[in-house]
Image (tube, grey):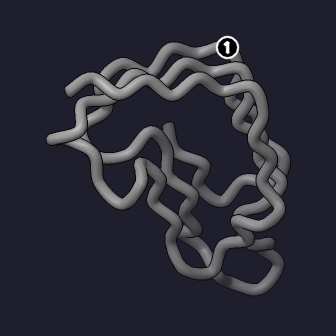
Amino acid sequence: MAFVGVDGAEVRFNTIYRPERWAFRILQETTAAGFVACRNGRFTDNIVAFHSSQWSSGGVNIGPNTAPGTFQFARNWWCLHR
């Protein structure tokens, strides 16, 4: 999953099975005037099943010029497969 330049997107009720690097990314492609930083996303009620050998950076990639502190996370299940 990728939150790219969004303001208020929601990812809910998904099963993410063995992502190769990250479960999701927070990115900003456009920094031109008039564009807000990627913000206010919600990642809730998801199942993330990952393999430890394919996991990178805690499963989340946060790019520059974003507002990751505005994102909400709740009721997600994280399952490690070794």
Q: Is residue 58 left or right of residue 51?
A: right
> Horizontal and vertical percent for residue 28?
58, 68
Considering only vertical position in the picture, is 40 above or below 14? below
> Horizontal and vertical percent for residue 26?
57, 58
Graded by Cα atoms within 10 Å as few (under 14), some (14 to 19) or many (20 or more), the crowding at tag 1 reads: few
Considering only vertical position in the picture, is 63 above or below 23? below
> What is the quadrant of residue 40 in the picture?
bottom right
Residue visible at 68% across and 83% down in the picture: 32
Q: Helix or strand or loop: what does disc 1 sit on?
A: loop
Considering only vertical position in the picture, is 2 above or below 45? below
Residue visible at 51% across and 28% down in the picture: 78
Q: Amino acid at mark 1?
A: Phe
39 or 82, nearer to the observer: 82
> Horizontal and vertical percent for residue 33?
77, 86
Residue reaching furthest to the bottom: 33
64 or 35, nearer to the observer: 64
33 or 66, nearer to the observer: 66
Residue visible at 82% across and 78% down in the picture: 34
> What is the quadrant of residue 51 in the picture?
top left
Residue reaching furthest to the left: 53
Residue visible at 41% across and 54% down in the picture: 58
The residue singled out by tag 1 in the image is 13
Considering only vertical position in the picture, is 50 above or below 30? above
> Horizontal and vertical percent for residue 67?
74, 71
Quadrant containing the C terminus in the rendered view: top left
Number of numbered discs: 1
